[in-house]
Image (spheres, rainbow, N blue to C red):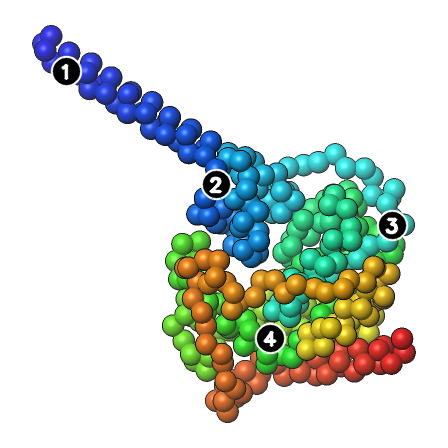
Amino acid sequence: MRKVMSHLADLVAGIRGSRVEAAAQVKHKLLARPSREDVLNGFRLILGREPEDEHAISAHMLIPTVAELRQALLASEEFRGKYKVMHPGSEAHPSLSMGRRTIFFIHLQKTGGTSLRIMLERQFPADRRCPVLEDKLHLLSVAELGQYDFFAGHFDQSSLRFIPRDNIKTVALFREPRARLISLYRFLRSHPVGDEFTDSYLIRLASESSAEEFFERPELRHYWAMNNHYLIALGSSFSWFDQNRASMSQEKLSQLLHDAKLQIRSLTAIGITEQFERSVPMICKSLDLTPVPAIEAVHVTDKFSEKDSRFRRVDAVIMTPRLEGAIEDLIAYDDELYAFAKSEFERRLIEE
């Protein structure tokens, strides 16, 4: 029995020793300077996305330790924005900021809006930029929303109603609808099928399908990012579409088209992706912002593989008659809205 007890004691001591050694190794790694892989994993696990570019990776690799990298990401505006609804605040009453000028950027997907957003947000103090970039402003309290002067994200026009301000300047950027959809397809196709993207049906579908096969799938008509995105974002709301997509009448769609045109006309500033260089100065002037000499293109699909080997380079997509037919219904209303936005843009350009 003594031998058995002695053996058990040695075994427990060995386990404890292994745990202490493992804990020491973990502590040692936390005190090491972040590697490239540490930075990539930190962004994926904490922020839920890839770093913007090589510059962002290099800058975070300069942080002294992995532990400090973790703290920096947890303390970032972006992290606080993603999880802000979990942390009630004690903001001032929104009536105190009702008169402050506010800019609201409706970031229509795959129009080059990330580059424009970064340019615009740099002209506001960090604590006045709303960190919520997705269509989740309704989850914040009125008091929380009242502390910000700059909003930019994949919002629809209904989100404007949540902002407790009297003076809101609005801006949107428009891209030719076929080019927008092809860009979205290539963006999805470049992603790895797995890891944090395992649950993405669209990434998996794009990965295994040609462009023609992808857009011919009937279920794509259920996604507001795919199906006449401008019409839904500016004529109604994404949540409305999700609830009513199976029963949209021609009469209702015509009403949405009319409302979307009114929304475009009411925008304080309009940009056209294909005329980006002409758009930026006019946007800055319309929003009373300081003009910028140049804007760096960020979040570019063709550069994803340079910063993360899991991503793949994607071939250019050639418009074929079959592809044209596959996306025809997905852009029917957006085609008209894009032409309307271009006409409004040219009119304002002439009037400057």
Regarding mark 1 in the picture, which secondary structure is present there?
A: helix
Q: Nearer the viewer, mark 2 or mark 1?
A: 2
Q: Quadrant of residue 240?
A: bottom right
Rendered position, 17 above or below 208: above
Query: Which residue lies under the disc numbered 2?
Result: 34
Q: Residue at x 58, y 62 (%)?
A: 299
Q: Are marks 2 and 4 in contact (CB under 8 Å)?
A: no
Which residue does the numbered mark 3 point to in the structure image? 100
User: Mark 1: which amino acid?
Assistant: His
Q: Give x and y (percent) for residue 293.
A: 76, 64
The disc, 2 or 4, on the residue closer to the chain's N-terminal end is: 2
Q: Which residue is mark 1?
A: 7
In the image, 31 versus 196, the foreground residue is 31
- Residue 148 to residue 344: above or below: above
- Determine if residue 73 is in view: yes
Q: Secondary structure at mark 3?
A: loop
Q: What residue does disc 4 label?
A: 180
Foreground of the two, 122 or 222:
122
As rendered, which of 113 and 322 lies closer to the eye? 113
- Say what amino acid the circle numbered 4 marks: Arg
Mark toward the start of the polypeptide (2 vs 1) = 1
From the top left corner, tell me how far across and down residue 190 is, in percent. Answer: 46, 67
For the residues bearing labels 3 and 2, Cβ distance under 8 angstroms: no
Could you give the CA–CA distance between mark 3 and mark 1, rounded to whole angstroms? 74 Å
- Residue 164 position, x and y percent, is 81, 50
Residue name at image x 56 percent, y 57 percent: 53
